Every structure is written in C-alpha cells, then in structure tokens.
Image (tube, helix red, strand yellow):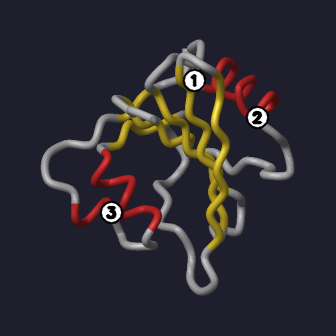
Amino acid sequence: MLSIRAWWLVTAPTDLRCGMDRLLLQVRVVLGRDPAEGEAYVFGNRAGTRIKLLCCDRHGVWLAVRRLQQGRFVWPRAGEAAWTLSAEQFGWLCAGVDWQRLSIGPITHARAG
C-alpha cells in the first residue's frame, strides 16, 4: 500500500502524453532531486484540466491520471519550480477546490537547483 510522506507539485505545465520515465526525468531536471520512496509528484497540463500523479515506493513507481469534467485545477503561478503540499491540500487540489485559500499555515515553495 502506498504511504506518501511528501507531496511535490511541479508548477510548470507538463505534456501529459508522456509516461512515467519522462516524468521521472522531469523530477530530476526540474526539481534537481532523485525521486524517492514515499514521495509523490503532481504534474498538470497547460489547460489545467488534467493532472498526473507519480508515486514512488520500494517496489516501483505508480502513475495515476485525473481529469476534471468541468472547471480547472487550481494551480499556483509559475515562478517557483515546485511547491510542497500536505495530503489535505492534495485532496483539495484533486477536488478542484482552491486549496491555496483553504490552507492553514505556510505553503513551502521549492526552487530548482
């Protein structure tokens, strides 16, 4: 069973036609880090209607896709390479809710590098 301890949201739009190998490369290039067990990485398309979630565990990699039938996912403005999210914030993001307004406490920004 997946046990996620860290959630990373990649802010730059991503071509979601790519598979897990290219997304793993994105984690290394954009975030400047190696994908790690217990971490999840969220990528969004330019239109804001789809996300892909890449999760790593000790046995391999999971890839999930979510598409909204109406509306758009609330995405932070570009400027930072990634944001860290709590599990609760990720749940709000998946529901299409403005998770940035509902968040309690600071949201951590991460710079590539």
* Residue on which disc 3 sits: 99
The residue at the far right in this view is 17
Q: Position of residue 20 (x, y in %)?
A: 76, 34
Q: Is 84 placed left or right of 26 in the picture?
A: left
* Residue on which disc 2 sits: 20
* Residue on which disc 1 sits: 31
Mark 3 closeness class: few <14, some 14–19, many ≥20 residues within 10 Å: many
Q: Amino acid at mark 1?
A: Leu
**Quadrant assignment for the N terminus:** top left
Secondary structure found at label 2:
helix
Q: Position of residue 90 (x, y in %)?
A: 39, 53
Q: State the image quarter where residue 85 is shown.
A: top left
Q: Nearer the viewer, mark 3 or mark 2?
A: 2
- Identify the residue at horizontal 54%, vertical 22% (top origin): 112
Task: Judge whether 94 appears above or below 53 on screen.
Answer: below
Q: Is 46 placed left or right of 84 in the picture?
A: right
